[in-house]
Amino acid sequence: MNNFTFHNPTKIIFGKNSISQLKTVLDPGSKILMTYGGGSIKRNGVYDQVTDALKKYSIHEFGGIEPNPEYETCLKAARVVKDEGIDFLLSVGGGSVLDGTKFIAASTYYTGKDPWDILTEGAQKTVKKALPIGCVLTLPATGSEMNGNAVISRRARGEKLAFSSPHVYPRFSILDPETTYSLPERQVINGIVDAYIHVIEQYLTCDVHTPLQDRQAEAILITLIEQAPLVKENPRDYNARANIMWCATQALNGTIVCGAVEDWTTHRIGHELTVLHGLDHAQTLAIILPAVMQHQREKKKDKILQYAKRIWGITESDPEKAIDQAIEKTVSFFNSIGMPTRLQDYKLTPDSCMTAADNLARRGDILGEHKDIGKKEVQEILRLCA
Amino acid sequence: MNNFTFHNPTKIIFGKNSISQLKTVLDPGSKILMTYGGGSIKRNGVYDQVTDALKKYSIHEFGGIEPNPEYETCLKAARVVKDEGIDFLLSVGGGSVLDGTKFIAASTYYTGKDPWDILTEGAQKTVKKALPIGCVLTLPATGSEMNGNAVISRRARGEKLAFSSPHVYPRFSILDPETTYSLPERQVINGIVDAYIHVIEQYLTCDVHTPLQDRQAEAILITLIEQAPLVKENPRDYNARANIMWCATQALNGTIVCGAVEDWTTHRIGHELTVLHGLDHAQTLAIILPAVMQHQREKKKDKILQYAKRIWGITESDPEKAIDQAIEKTVSFFNSIGMPTRLQDYKLTPDSCMTAADNLARRGDILGEHKDIGKKEVQEILRLCA
């Protein structure tokens, strides 16, 4: 097991009617900026629940944070923070709203020229302090509710980059599974696939003797596979909603990667496809993961075989056939819940995506747990996505 | 899934040579009281590592905190805290030293007559503040390094009671698996059994639709079963030591019980046996758990059958026989690593232990997840421990 540090200070308040507990975790004197997205919270009752819980607080609002939150939008919110003397950010929505809010929180105290530096120069150097953040989560997917990560897009430059800082962990996150009843099916599917692949990126790597962490990862994968059809069948199945929500949080709160090796190749290529072609984040992951498994089948052999056996019950003794079956099972699972897995499903071809490889190469990004996936390998992976 | 709140702010620093990182987490101006036990840390080099890392700090020492830390001892340490103006407690040792340190931390700010009130009246009412605590852990077992629980004994009154408070979570815990190489075998065995039964107490309960938490619990059980013989075979197997250490932490850091039902019957009866007859904590648990499983086999039927299948691979179709086999397998596992499971192994009889039932009854304690294990049922369980 590798040495590690684990520190996750986010308080989770989980369950039915938990939004009413907002007043127990917010300082009454706070000057709050409530951030949200396209307005679905006004249709599904969450906005009313939040404002009802915070009747006695001073609240400003900033709506319109888009999926794959845009740098320019965040800068606008940061100006509201300064103009209004905001001292607490309350993100109400999914992972995109929260990621945007994290960037707003970090940029508030950034003293350099351009807060975009946070994405390009690394948060360790650029983020020494951030506004405190709270979260009311309405979409289980990214795990942002219990980590210090955020991904920000700058469409004008064709960039989608991540940063990570201990200063932007939410102080609290409120997760009421009932708020997810009204989600569009596409977002539900996206969320399940996103959480699944978060686990895979921290699990399908070389073995450094972390059997507990492996099994904790497998626990999430098996539960997602088990619960996904229940939610598809009955969108108001509380327990299935709760289980998927909790899986998504546990998938990226730092637990399963303790002392283990991670490999964010699928995400990194996926971000480029979203920027290039506007595909949803999870849609890109579902296309790229099977290709990464195929391309890295030799280097990831042992763990793919463990995955084949423990997740899919594959008993095939020929390791090459077992790996093929594991990839097929993964694809079948995504397809079964309505998630396509090929570029052609979006009328795209590998050739139309090669800019992704160029962009990664231009930034000098070498991917993979062994740091051996460069431009040529990304191109090969993209060819496997046809 | 039940509603829940989860908040675990402890920073874990895990791995080889991690004690040297003490200076990165301790405020240089702190006036530190270093607490420890019987002095094994002076023989195994941990004391030297700690004092070496803290050469530039102001440190006082308080040794002699015993297994099942004693109230009177803690009060003595609390006087040192006041006399010397201590503002930080550094626990160096196992769970007993840390539990004692948590009580010292809480009692420092207790304004009532007798700090024992913290144990009898509940920490929610009595603990509003505590001295900050850090931990260097040398014995994986109790999970105290990443929770707010402590158990304190008062032998003069024949009492061993627990308290739990968010104020006594360690600010940080440093876990170097190499410090466990020199542990006496008895403590290693105790630690494995203690961690195993911590999981069981949060898992072998009625099902409230928490499939992820169930599998996270099973992940720990299976890993303990797998790693225990490795450590027995080679006490210097780093990965096995690391895996057991991390299992023990994960077993009682609040994760597996999120939204689930817990039942601390085995622990509660066990505490009484330790007070009565001086058995090690884990020794009492290994005796009582099989009897609790037997006594509660109807009420815990579904989960015992799940445990039988998933942990022990039992395929027996007759549920009664499967439950018998699951209990046998549990006993065999404990025995296989050198842990006895009967009162007679300690030359005790059920009759010699009935005071345990009286003591629980006298305090009005009704045990069990359904609150239906009273004096008569505790007596029945004890009869099954012969």
Image (spheres, coloured by chain):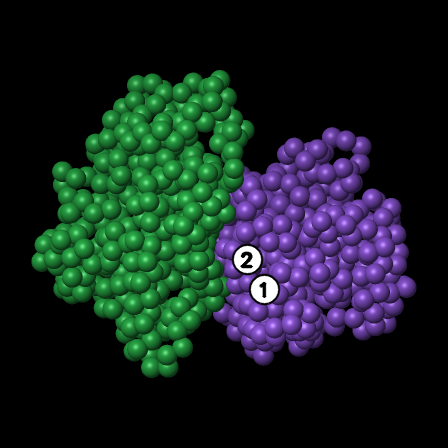
Chain colours: A purple, B green
The chain to which mark 1 is attached is: A
Instruction: Say above or below: A286 vs A144.
Output: below
Labels 2 and 1 in the same subunit:
yes
Q: Residue shown at 51%/26% (left/top)?
A: B23
Q: Residue shown at 33%/35% (left/top)?
A: B97
Query: As drawn, which residue projects farthest toward the bottom?
Result: B318
Q: Residue shown at 50%/47% (left/top)?
A: B239
Residue B243's spot in the image, x, y percent? 47, 49
Residue ID for mark 1: A306
A285 displayed left or right of B225: right
Residue ID for mark 2: A214
Mark nearest the camera among 2 and 1 is 1
Inspect the image, locate mark 1, and give the three-letter code of the amino acid beneath it: Gln
Q: Is residue B367 visible?
A: yes
B219 displayed left or right of B42: right
Q: Residue shown at 82%/51% (left/top)?
A: A374
Q: Are marks 2 and 1 in contact (CB under 8 Å)?
A: yes
> Where, quadrant-wise, is the C terminus of chain A in this rendering?
bottom right
